[in-house]
Image (tube, rainbow, N blue to C red):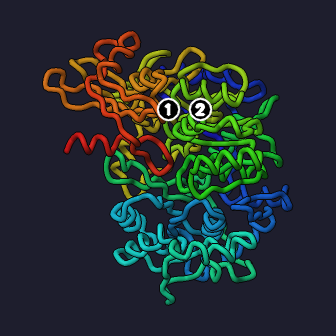
Amino acid sequence: MVYYSGVSWSNNRYNDVMSKRTWESSYPEGVVWDINIEDKPAFAVLDEAVALYPDHAAIDFMGKSLTYRELSRLVDCAALGFQKLGVGEGTRVGLFLPNTPHFIISFFGVLKAGGIVVNYSPLDSVMELIHKARDSGSEIIVTLDLEALFPTIARVFAETDVDKLVVGTLQEMLPFPKNLLFPLLKRSQIARVPQDENHVRFSALIDNDGTYEKHTVAKPADEVAVLQYTGGTTGIAKGAMLTHLNLVAACSQYLAFSSGTRPSLQRGSDVFLAVLPLFHIFALQVNMFLAVATGSKLILHPRFEIDAVLKDIDAKKPTIFPGVPAMYSAIINHDEVSRFDLSSLHNCMSGGAPLPLDTLKQFEALTGTRICEGWGMTETSPAGTGTPLYGTYKEGSCGVPLPRVEMCIYDAETSTTPLATGEKGEICIKGPNVMKGYWQRPDATAEAFNADGFFRSGDSGYIDEDGFVFLIDRIKDMILCSGFNVYPRNIEEAIYQHPDVEEVIVIGVADAKRGQSPKAFIKLKAGAPAMTIEQLQGFLDERLGRHEMVRAMELRDALPKTPVGKLSKKELYAEEQA
């Protein structure tokens, strides 16, 4: 079966926009918009890779290697283990895991058993985790016996209806002799796990022959595969229902955009450096799904440590590195980066937040590799736009809509009027990658889509005559200064041009005269001299309009970040309001 997203539209102005699809002319040579997307379950991506590349390395974890054949066997054993615990169609199983093989094995094992994966962030607060567990109705949660994880999830277990905890160990996934040394050298990092029927060892879960009862996904477009929580920065987190087809479609869209006459992904030979946490939708798709779909090796890092990342790039020669802007900033600002050979990288992707232009230029000058920026959201799985690795590139753009993505700019207030080329409004998106809706929130789902069936992103921007999309800012982050619309991203881009600035966040704060005014929170580069607000304003004088000028500034040793490493404004807004 083949999924086709063609729709008959009554909105003539939208028809006019889509009939032109100007972005297709900006695609890399050989890439087309009108691709077929196969109607299949998400776990078929793994099964197909195993059939094609059974003896290729699939995972490298701290020196431990698994082939695709070995990974498939463990996934099948996990599927049977989950079914023995009662997992069937629609059972919600939480993953509270860092980047270890447990995550990939459990993810595909849950889906093969018929269940729904609920991704939990190990950096969430206990109250956030309790909310997600109750809201999703998670019955089982998979975690590790680490002090950094288990005591937290034990509290969630005690205060919710979660029935069982499946608990793995790091040493069971380590090579010899690390597997023997870890419990001796890291004893203080290992938590004590109760030995009762409510706590199941991961080793016991997969201790079987793998002959699980195969689950048939009759309608991949309807059956939910993942509950991915989002919206915590603006209110109570909501579970985006991502179907099997949503995940397959997004993977297919990225693959199609990376193909053409000069493909940027090499099937069967690429090596992905997976530093981004797989519990985040960006990493789940561009690391795990893309790597598996291309039969590539996935080097797993439990967390981002700049020295470890540089050493692995130098020694293990990864070719693909998806990251967020803060990671690229850390690389270019590392004191000894010149000691490391980064030449193996040929495809670097950035998502999660706008990539400062200065960071992009410095990274390209350092490595000779262009960073491909993209835009997407949890609700879009997270496919949306992509910057061509080869061919046309426009500074400040997040790229062009991916194959099968339908994108239009609507008026931000009512989302009823499609706007013309170059007009600024709300970015709205439709396609087979867009979520089914929010879990148990029909009102929120209805509000998220406009009358033409487009998902309202909440991001302001415009599409130029060549189909390139330009982000302005989050609509809710826009600052109203004396009646003028001021966008924090424009100010941040100007501040990033200062040679002493490593990271910056700009938010709007209350101003008795202007209503609101911009305030900058800045982390300076190591060794840089302190900066005053007057010095900053002098630097920005020729770069910003008077209505955009920063009126307040704080220097900080570190800026708040989300679990995926994206700079976060939520904490700063809360501080200012307090």
> Is residue 450 positioned above or below 108 on the image?
above
CA separation, marks 2 and 1?
Answer: 8 Å
The 10 Å Cα crowd at callout 2, few under 14, some 14 to 19, many 20 or more, is: many
Residue for point 72% across, 55% down: 45
Residue for point 74% across, 62% down: 63
| Amino acid type indicated by mark 2 | Glu
The 10 Å Cα crowd at callout 1, few under 14, some 14 to 19, many 20 or more, is: many
Q: Which mark is residue 262?
A: none
SS class of the residue under badge 1? loop
Expressed as whole percent of the image width and height from the top left, the position of residue 154 reads 42, 75
The answer to whether residue 393 is seen in the rendering is: yes
The residue carrying mark 2 is 373
Expressed as whole percent of the image width and height from the top left, the position of residue 172 reads 67, 75
Q: Earlier in the sequence, mark 2 or mark 1?
A: 1
Which is nearer the eye, 49 or 14? 49
Residue for point 64% across, 31% down: 371
User: In the drawing, does residue 544 fall left or right of residue 196?
Assistant: left
Expressed as whole percent of the image width and height from the top left, the position of residue 356 reads 51, 28
- Furthest residue to the top? 542
Q: Which mark is residue 354?
A: 1
Which is nearer the eye, 119 or 361? 361
Which is nearer the eye, 197 or 41? 197
Label 2–label 1 contact, CB within 8 A:
yes
- Furthest residue to the left? 512
> Is residue 165 positioned above or below 75 on the image?
below
Residue for point 51% across, 74% down: 188
The answer to whether residue 2 is seen in the rendering is: no
Q: Quadrant of residue 382?
A: top right
User: In the drawing, does residue 490 fall left or right of residue 553?
Assistant: right
SS class of the residue under badge 2? strand
| Amino acid type indicated by mark 1 | Pro
